[in-house]
Image (cartoon, rainbow, N blue to C red):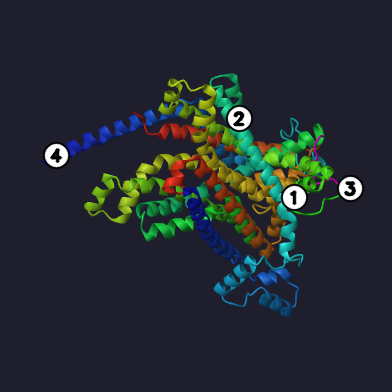
Amino acid sequence: MDNNVKQENIDFEELEKKQKWETVSKLWYKFSRNKLSVVGLVVIILIILAAVFAPYIVPYPEHGGPYTDFMNANKAPSSEYLLGTDIFGRDVLSRIIFALRGALSIGIVVLAISVPIGVTVGLIGGYFSGTWIETVVMRITDVFLGIPPLILALAIAAMLEPNLTNSMIAITVSWWPWYARLIYGMSSSLRNEPFIRAAELTGANLPHILFKEILPNCYGPIFTKMTLDMGWVILNAASLSFVGLGEQPPIPALGNMVSNGADYLPDYWWMAIFPALAIMIIILAFNLLGDGVRDMLAKEEG
Amino acid sequence: MKLRKYITKRIFYSVFVLLGLSILIFLIGSLVPGDPARLALGPHAPDWAVENLRKEMNLDKPLYTQYFLWLKDSLNGDFGESLVTRRPIIKDIVEFLPATLEIVLVSAIFMAVFGIGLGILSARFTDSWVEGVIRIISYLGIVTPAFVWAIIFILIFGYIIPIFPTIGRISSGIDLPPSITGMITIDGLLTGNFVAAFNTIKHILLPAIALAMGGIAQAARITRSTMTDNMGKDYILAAKAYGIPQKVIMNKLLLKPSLIPTVSIMALDIAALIGNAFLVELLFNYPGLSRYGVRAMLNKDLNAISAVVLIIGVTYILANIIIDIIIAYLDPRVRYLGGKSNG
């Protein structure tokens, strides 16, 4: 008897493994049907690798900090300095690659904190729709949505010391409401589905209903939005450092490189244009990837 | 009429959001580590001066009293003095807000006109090169931040083909029209000072387009996709079967419902526009509220920051009301069911 059960278990596991593999290859098929999504993915992998191994791959590792070399200042792009040098004689390419580290870590940390908060708020608001809990939770969300997110982030960043951590805090506070609203819409319509009623009748507790029953139905839009948002969070962080409320020099950040470079237009155009281009490539890549994730996770029609 | 009831409801609700927003802004203001009065006066100020400023800023009272006093003053248009220049903030706002409104309005008009226009164009020419070109433009528009457009425009129109001014609001040496609305274009047109009006428009054009590009792209993309979706719907097929002319179908039956998603998304575009104005005004050295706000933020000028953020909040909420009214006009379901704006 015991043996029998074990035997069945093994079969089941193998079956599951096989099924999992099939789902993965099916998902990849759906994702890779659009070649641009694959391009986006490749670019993002390259960006991540460049950021992680920055000190080993940049041409001038010491240029990522308060280095000065006035002999080589304001050099136009050449074979020696591929993207030129800034007013302190630092290699623009090296600094862009170093700046990717801050940019990516802001994107990851902001989403890692704001998405769970927003999703939980949205789930609660939607599940309790029609009660005072919904009113309280969603009206608070509306207040945060009552102001452009960049302005909210700027105002918070202005109150704190300008650095990477505080930029993360400022953007996180302005970011969660968008997830709350997205999930609220979905969960309030799922709320009256029979499977939720069934879970309630069997006595499932609240966390189980919210996170095990409702949440899995929202994964598609959440992951799609998260992929797209990586680019937008990085842009917001760049905007903070652009006005001087993000990371401070000499730490390289894409935003402050653009704004400092803009002072030297048009003669030293490379100082502003290349970091700006880097921001655009990051946003473009995450947009392409996001389109692919959407195709991949879209519910099959018909 | 139903529409009026809906608008009343919508405005009532906005007052509530605004009240919540004022609490949020007040709380952000209290985030400052340390003593705002000491921060404003610097480390060398004598203690009695700091103490006086603390009293003046009501910092000696409990938090909720501070909030109500601040709210009462703000509602009366008294935002206190700038902690840096000691000028009454309301004076600065009256001076700088119209300049920003001018840019934002022009930019919003560009967004609506060109965005929807391009969208209709590309829906009409599906599967032709026109659609392809518009698609590439709209993708580029979406991924290019406003401040990058601004830099590109400054490079091209400021230096390579210098046909537009890239600094300031009006060229020096031009007589300003008397201030009626504070917006030089409108004041200039009203008082017959066309030189000033035309010169200001030239200054506004580049920053406004830089701010509008993202929204134009977004609006074009969404208008196109809703229109092509709706074209296959039964009511359009039925109208075609009845022999209703193509022009009437396009303009009357197809366009109105197809604009609903575009107009809805414009709330987000306007949020982005107002936020991006902070960067674009800096690049063009444009004397508007956003540049004023950035300076206040860099100086930790608490009173000025709260005032700017509050004014922007009011502006944004007003913009949202206008958008919701347009949607209610376009979409009878909203009017009659009183559907939520966040649906």
The answer for which chain carries disc 4 is A
Where residue B173 is drawn, which disc sits there?
3
Image: A136 above or below A56: below
Residue B97 found in image quarter: bottom right
Looking at the image, how many numbered discs can be counted on the residues?
4
Q: For numbered disc 4, what is the local secondary structure?
A: helix
The answer for which chain carries disc 3 is B
Q: Badge 1 local density, few (<14 within 10 Å), some, or many (20+)?
A: many
Pick the front one: B24 or A234: B24
Farthest right residue in view: B173
Percent from the top left, x then y, of residue A185?
A: 41, 47
The answer for which chain carries disc 2 is B
Residue that mark 4 sits on? A3
The answer for which chain carries disc 1 is B
Farthest left residue in view: A1
For the residue marked with disc 3, what is the amino acid?
Gly
Residue span colored magenta: B163-174
Q: For numbered disc 3, what is the local secondary structure?
A: loop
Image: A201 above or below B69: above
CA gap, disc 2 and disc 4: 69 Å
Q: Residue at x 73, y 70 (%)?
A: B41
> Depth-wise, is mark 4 or mark 3 nearer the camera?
3
Residue that mark 1 sits on? B183
Residue that mark 2 sits on? B118
Percent from the top left, x then y, of residue A265?
A: 78, 40
> Depth-wise, is mark 4 or mark 1 nearer the camera?
1
Majority secondary structure in the magenta region: loop
For the residue marked with disc 2, what is the amino acid?
Leu
Q: Residue at x 76, y 31 (%)?
A: A78
Percent from the top left, x then y, of residue B155?
A: 77, 36
